[in-house]
Image (spheres, rainbow, N blue to C red):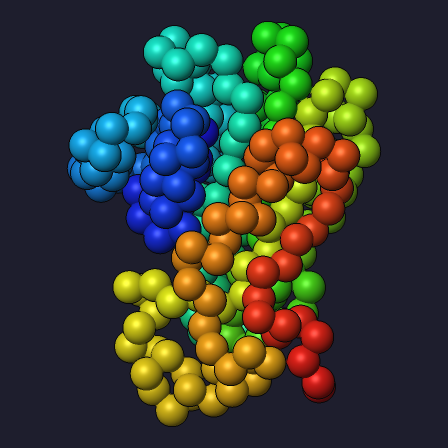
Amino acid sequence: MVTGGSSGFGRHFARFLASNGAKVTLAARRAEALASAVAEINAAGDTAQSVVLDVTLSDSVAGAMEQAESTFGPIHAVANNAGITVTKPAIEQDERAWDSVVDTNLKGVWLVAQAAAKRMIANKVGGSIVNIASILGLRVAGAVAPYAISKAGVIQMTKVLALEWARYGIRINALAPGYFATELNDDFFESEHGQALIKRVPQRRLGQLRELDGPLLLLVSNAGSFMTGSVVAVDGGHLVSGL
């Protein structure tokens, strides 16, 4: 299952995992966008389905997982990807913005991980959960305070759950992307501020989505069978850049 599977990282992850033999369930709130993504994957000869899911609601999460398993069988891996942000200085971030970002990025990741683990334990399959964090959970940037705080929480959650669930054969790791080129951020990275940010990345460029493929496959597959509680940064060296 890939949450946030209708666009961005999630859509790419779903397409990539399906091309590597997985039966993928794409989960998100937008039914039309999900249908488009599933059609694209199935047209390529791979196997995908979709379920409508609101990660902030436990009943929605449980129902989506039950629906997914009714067709494809027990869930063995989850890319726990759904996330949003609100870009404003911290002093201007209102309660509604905080609740929206933290509920989706932190509570949502928790609910999905917990529901997936319960099903893995009940089905006696073990499995892998990859929480999509961010380098902003390890360092900070301006105007995205709730996002950075939520992603720091995702990283600590990953470590806590890895400790508790190893006994069940469930691995929990985090993937922490840096700045990547997507259709959503093209305009910003063409601006003066965007170009200045790129210059602070040691490799002096943005990541390409395909450069997340290897790390994701490592974490979801048996290639990473002795990895749990790990945080894998994919950021062109941004985290080690000078202050």
| Residue 92 in view | no
- How many numbered discs, if any? 0
Q: Where in the figure is residue 84, as x and y percent of width and height?
A: 43, 54
Q: Quadrant of residue 146?
A: bottom right
Q: Where in the figure is residue 240, as x and y percent of width and height?
A: 70, 75
Q: Is residue 63 above or below residue 206?
A: above
Front-lying residue, 19 or 216: 19
Residue located at (51% from left, 82% from top): 204
Q: Is residue 199 above or below residue 38?
A: below
Image quarter in which the N terminus is found: top left
Q: Is residue 24 above or below residue 241?
A: above
Residue located at (60% from left, 41% from top): 218
Residue located at (76% from left, 34% from top): 226
Left or right of 237 in this view: 163: right
Left or right of 38 in this view: 231: right
Q: Where in the figure is residue 9, as x and y percent of width and height?
A: 41, 51
Q: Quadrant of residue 138?
A: bottom right
Residue located at (80% from left, 20% from top): 167
